[in-house]
Amino acid sequence: MAALAPWKVGSFRVVSFDLRSLSGLSEAERSVVGMALSGLDNRGIAERRQSSARTVANQLAVAYRKLGVSSRAELLARLMK
């Protein structure tokens, strides 16, 4: 996965984030976070990663806990600081 994750609104790319700055996350967690920030839902992420939506939800929950956030919106706000 690329180090930069675009945040999209409709078909417009608004901003990119350097996910390498998310120290403390595993490669899988960074990958899932990046896909979530690109606008994919858990099912879409699971399809791309060839895993289950439940696994994706668990990976996101672990990443959120490590980053001190509780949602995609809070994650986006944290990365925009």
Image (spheres, grey):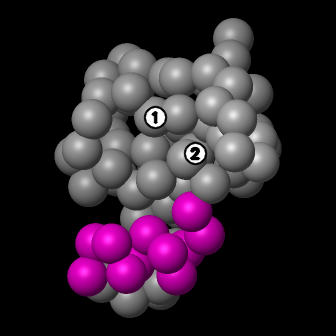
The C terminus - image quarter: top right
Chief SS of the magenta region: helix
Q: Residues within 10 Å of mark 1 (few under 14, many from 20)?
A: many
Q: Are marks 1 and 2 in contact (CB under 8 Å)?
A: yes
Q: CA distance from mark 1 to mark 2?
A: 7 Å
Q: Residue at x 64, y 31 (%)?
A: 13
Residue 12 coordinates in the image, percent (x, y): 70, 35
Q: As displayed, is residue 41 above or below residue 34?
A: below
Q: In the picture provided, is 71 more to the left or to the right than 5?
A: right
The N terminus: image quadrant: top left
Instruction: Tell me if residue 76 comes above or below residue 47 in the rendering.
Output: above
Spot the residue most to the front: 11
Question: Residue 14 or 11: which is nearer the viewer?
Answer: 11
x, y percent for residue 78: 67, 25
Amino acid type at image mark 2: Leu
Q: Could you tell whether 50 is left or right of 74 in the image? A: left
Residue 53 placed where, x, y %? Answer: 47, 84
Q: Is residue 50 left or right of residue 4?
A: left
Say which of 49 and 28 sits in front.
49
Q: Residue at x 27, y 35 (%)?
A: 2
Residue 5: which disc?
Answer: 1
- Image point (76%, 42%), residue name: 9
Please tell me in which quadrant of the rendered image residue 15 appears. Answer: top right
Task: Give the residue at x 46% y 53%.
Answer: 35
Which amino acid is tagged 1?
A: Ala
Residue for badge 2: 37
Secondary structure category for the residue under label 1 = strand
In the image, the segment drawn in magenta is 40-50
Apparent side of residue 23 relative to residue 18 in the rendered image (left or right)? left
Disc 2 crowd rating (10 Å Cα; few below 14, some 14-19, many 20+) is many
Percent position (x, y) of residue 48?
Answer: 33, 72
